[in-house]
Amino acid sequence: MKKTHLYLCGPMSGLPDNNRPEFDRTAEILRLHGYVVFCPTENGLPAGTAWENHMRADIRALMGVSNVALMPGSKDSRGCKLELTIARELNMTVKNVDQWIYEAKKRT
């Protein structure tokens, strides 16, 4: 069976440690459910890199998938709004993290 690739979309700016622990935890849970996950905390750039450069790297990764997993708080995030605009305009499948997990459990 072909694995589903997900882009993990969630809030980072203004949160403690840029929400890295929650991103890493969520990515691991999705991976345990059989998904291949791109997590923005793993984009290869140092944490202190300018927001614009992180977004460029993350958008490049977004272009490599067809599915987006939304973390809580995504609707209020400037970066998520940009990523979601791109995803929806390109007809990507966008679902909450919990929905992706539910679907994975249905398959097993």
Image (cartoon, rainbow, N blue to C red):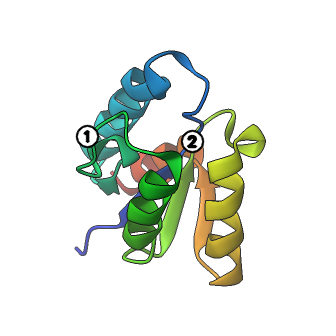
Amino acid type for the residue under numbered disc 2: Gly
Which residue has dot 2 on it? 10
In the rendered image, residue 75, in percent from the top left (x then y), is placed at: 76, 44
Residue sitting at x 43%, y 56%: 53
Q: Decide which of 90, 78 is in the foreground and name it.
A: 78
- Which mark is in front, 2 or 1? 2
Left or right: where does residue 44 sit relative to residue 77? Answer: left
Left or right: where does residue 39 sit relative to residue 81? Answer: left
In the rendered image, residue 48, in percent from the top left (x then y), is placed at: 37, 34
Helix, strand or loop at label 1? It is helix
Give the quarter of the image for residue 3: bottom left
Measure how far apart labels 2 and 1 are at the Cα level.
19 Å
In the rendered image, residue 15, in percent from the top left (x then y), is placed at: 57, 21
Q: Earlier in the sequence, mark 2 or mark 1?
A: 2
Amino acid type for the residue under numbered disc 1: Leu
Most distant residue in the top direction: 16
Residue sitting at x 41%, y 33%: 23
Q: Decide which of 89, 95 is in the foreground and name it.
A: 89
**Quadrant position of the N terminus in the picture:** bottom left
Residue sitting at x 49%, y 68%: 67
Helix, strand or loop at label 2? It is loop
Please, is residue 23 above or below residue 7 in the view? above
Q: Which mark is residue 32?
A: 1
Q: Residues within 10 Å of mark 2 (few under 14, many from 20)?
A: many
Q: Which mark is residue 21?
A: none
